[in-house]
Image (cartoon, grey):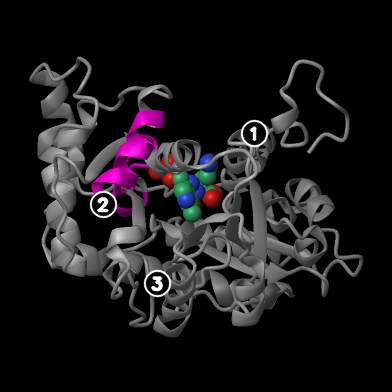
């Protein structure tokens, strides 16, 4: 992040600089490194999903799709919520297709927040949360997730809620920690949301990527929560199509309407031919959804022991693409930013310094995130390189 003031940049975005993912992916390319930084898979997703997009392009679906998204995709999203969580949504009024989960988050936050509103958010957080809250003129109220478990303290959550709190932003499975919130934690958040009459926005992009038999819990499925929850997800992680940027949100019509009003003026629409393809993917059999979690779990289990052997303190991860480590056994000053900037020079591997994802910078300074959504041979190669560090 630049310390200097950027002359033409709005005051709301001063300090946000260039995203760490752009910086580190560029570093991976310029140094020929293995990129375990930005989370994207290095293999294609299901053939039939890719073929459906090609067929849509060849079939002439190349103009603006409808504002809320193509009916076939909205119906498939509603069917997916019913199938996996027992939640019923009206595809016409309660589902909105967006440009990735990123735009769903932006639409929800810009559509619902007024200047001075407070957003309770768990720290660390995905990199777009803080700038979107800032663009809305609102204020983040971070609640720290502490390693090794990355659980939150319910008293700290309660204390973060004030008369100005408008919504709670929840991400589970959680990036960057890999934490999958338990039923007890979800219930704690739900109880407070109901007690204080708050909206909950949930980022569930890794909903199908959970390990060791853990279960992703949809906040909207808890009693009393459907009517106050906006659930966000995306096809990118589930179908290995992060570059397609097809996302969505579901919720009660007034919440969806607020997000839709903002979304109209961000991009209006996108991803026409990809929408029927993601619709097809959402209808794939259970074996597909089990398969992607099992496959990713095997990749996690390949990388983690390698990181231990390389000398890091490695924290457990139950979902997502990511594992976090404490670098201090290898770099006693604990400067994760310096460590990540130097790592490609030392051994041609790229990782993400977690500090940039923290509001409480001191808490994340010595932590670094590695992505394991890569082929096993690539992970092996990365481990071999990292083992030269010690
Ligand atoms: N939220 C989280 C927690 C993420 O990890 C990502 C992935 N980059 C996103 C949102 C954005 O998803 P998309 O690529 O669909 O915009
Ligand atoms: N979700 C991915 C990550 O956290 C990619 C993020 C991005 O490039 N915006 O690494």
Give the label, 2 or 1, closer to the camera.
2
Work out whether mark 3 precedes mark 2 in sequence or the reverse, and give the earlier one. 2
- Real-space Cα separation, disc 2 to disc 1, in angstroms: 40 Å
Establish whether ligand 1 lies closer than 8 Å to the Cβ of label 2: no
- Residue 99 seen in the current view: no
Dot 1 and dot 3 residues touching (CB under 8 Å):
no
Q: Position of residue 292 (x, y in %)?
A: 29, 63
Q: Position of residue 314 (x, y in %)?
A: 65, 76
- Residue position for label 3: 297
Residue closer to the observer: 43 or 216? 216
- Residue 210 seen in the current view: yes
Work out whether mark 1 precedes mark 3 in sequence or the reverse, and give the earlier one. 1
SS under mark 3: helix
Q: Residue furthest right?
A: 333
Residue at x 14%, y 39% (from the top left corner): 92
Q: Position of residue 331 (x, y in %)?
A: 86, 66
- Residue position for label 2: 252
Q: Is residue 185 magenta?
A: no
Quick check: 21 left or right of 374?
right
- Residue position for label 1: 26
Q: Which residues are magenta?
A: 237-262
Residue closer to the observer: 242 or 261? 261
SS under mark 2: loop
């Amino acid at each position: 992040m630049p310390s200097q003031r950027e002359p033409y940049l709005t005051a709301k975005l001063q300090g946000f600089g260039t995203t760490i993912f752009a910086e580190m992916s560029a570093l991976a390319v310029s140094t020929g490194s293995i990129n375990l930084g930005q989370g994207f898979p290095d293999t294609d997703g299901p053939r039939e999903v890719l073929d459906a997009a090609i067929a849509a392009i060849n079939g002439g679906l190349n103009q603006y799709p409808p504002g809320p998204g193509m009916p076939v995709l909205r119906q498939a999203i509603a069917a997916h919520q019913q199938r996996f969580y027992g939640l019923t949504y009206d595809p016409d009024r309660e589902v909105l297709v967006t440009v990735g989960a990123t735009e769903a988050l932006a639409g929800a936050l810009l559509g619902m927040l007024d200047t001075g509103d407070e957003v309770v958010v768990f720290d660390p957080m995905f990199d777009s949360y803080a700038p979107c809250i800032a663009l809305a003129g609102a204020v983040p109220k971070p609640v720290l997730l502490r390693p090794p478990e990355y659980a939150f303290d319910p008293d700290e959550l309660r204390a973060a809620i004030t008369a100005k709190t408008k919504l709670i932003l929840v991400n589970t499975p959680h990036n960057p920690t890999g934490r999958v919130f338990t039923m007890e934690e979800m219930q704690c958040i739900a109880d407070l949301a109901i007690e204080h009459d708050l909206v909950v926005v949930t980022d569930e992009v890794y909903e199908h990527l959970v390990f060791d038999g853990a279960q992703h819990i949809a906040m909207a499925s808890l009693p009393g929560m459907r009517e106050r929850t906006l659930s966000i997800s995306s096809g990118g992680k589930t179908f290995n199509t992060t570059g397609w940027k097809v996302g969505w949100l579901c919720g009660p019509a007034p919440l969806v309407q607020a997000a839709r009003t903002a979304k109209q003026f961000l991009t209006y629409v996108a991803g026409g031919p990809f929408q029927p393809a993601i619709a097809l993917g959402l209808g794939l059999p259970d074996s597909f959804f089990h398969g992607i979690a099992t496959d990713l779990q095997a990749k996690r289990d390949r990388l983690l022991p390698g990181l231990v052997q390389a000398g890091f303190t490695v924290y457990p991860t139950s979902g997502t693409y990511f594992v976090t480590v404490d670098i201090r056994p290898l770099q006693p000053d604990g400067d994760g930013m310096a460590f990540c900037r130097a790592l490609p020079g030392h051994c041609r591997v790229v990782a993400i310094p977690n500090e940039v994802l923290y509001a409480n910078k001191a808490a994340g300074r010595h932590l670094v995130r590695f992505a394991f959504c890569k082929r096993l041979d690539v992970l092996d190669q990365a481990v071999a390189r990292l083992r030269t560090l010690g």
